[in-house]
Image: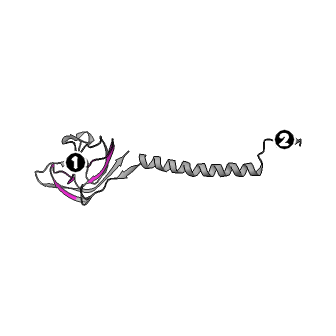
């Protein structure tokens, strides 16, 4: 081997310095990524002021599901995951203007549905069920979960 053949191989001290730098930059990169992810991930919306219980909620036709409307601090979406005891249509009220979810089709009983509702800051969201109440006057939300999607 000629003397110049090892010129491209860094010394052990240089290697340690590079590894040390990469470890330090990786730790700061991880902190940056964690901060970014905390801004981008979904977070659970849960408050006793919205609803004290989120399971086995018995409602009459068009009765608001939430005691107080759901609001988020900045533009984003609220993800609603819901399972019902009987076939119902789901109405979403944003600032008291109602519209059907699921293209106004009935949600089947005992199935899990997930809806994303876009909201601006200070928009108020509430939902209600619509169903044929000729025979049975109530419907049960077996489970409902709310998440803020940023």
C-alpha span from label 1 to label 2: 73 Å
Instruction: Tell which of 34 and 91 is nearer to you.
Output: 34
Residue 106 x, y percent position in the rendering: 23, 45
Residue 26 x, y percent position in the rendering: 59, 50
Q: Please identify the residue farthest to the right as the structure is shown.
A: 2
* 110 drawn magenta: no
- Position of residue 62 in the picture relative to residue 141 (left or right): left
Which stretch appears magenta? 57-83
* 69 drawn magenta: yes
- Position of residue 54 in the picture relative to residue 24 (left or right): left
Color theme of the render: one colour
Q: Residue at x 25, y 47 (%)?
A: 107
Residue 1 disc label: none
Vertical placement of residue 76 versus 112, above or below: above
Instruction: Please name which of the two marks, 1 or 2, marks the residue nearer to the observer.
Output: 2
Instruction: Tell which of 89 and 25 is nearer to you.
Output: 25
Instruction: Tell which of 115 and 23 is nearer to you.
Output: 23
Instruction: Check disc 2 and report the residue beneath it.
Output: 5
Q: Residue at x 66, y 52 (%)?
A: 20
Residue neighbourhood size for the residue with mark 1, other residues' Cα within 10 Å, grouped as few (<14), some (14–19), many (≥20): many
Quadrant where the N terminus sits is top right
Quadrant where the C terminus sits is top left
Vertical placement of residue 140 versus 126, above or below: below
Instruction: Check disc 1 and report the residue beneath it.
Output: 127
Number of marks? 2
The reply to whether discs 1 and 2 touch (Cβ–Cβ < 8 Å) is: no
Q: What secondary structure is marked by label 2?
A: helix
Residue 11 x, y percent position in the rendering: 78, 48
Q: Please identify the residue farthest to the left as the structure is shown.
A: 134
């Amino acid at each position: 081997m000629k003397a110049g053949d090892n010129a491209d191989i860094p010394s052990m001290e240089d290697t340690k310095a590079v590894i040390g730098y990469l470890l330090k930059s990786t730790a700061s990169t991880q902190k940056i990524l964690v901060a970014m992810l905390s801004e981008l991930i979904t977070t659970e919306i849960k408050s006793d002021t919205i609803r004290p219980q989120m399971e086995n909620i018995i409602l009459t036709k068009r009765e608001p599901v939430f005691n107080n409307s759901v609001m988020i601090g900045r533009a984003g979406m609220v993800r609603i995951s819901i399972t019902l005891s009987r076939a119902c249509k789901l109405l979403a009220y944003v600032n008291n203007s109602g519209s059907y979810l699921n293209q106004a089709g009935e949600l089947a009983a005992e199935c899990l549905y997930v809806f994303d509702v876009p909201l601006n800051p200070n928009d108020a969201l509430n939902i209600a069920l619509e169903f044929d109440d000729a025979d049975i006057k109530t419907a049960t939300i077996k489970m409902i979960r709310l998440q803020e999607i940023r």
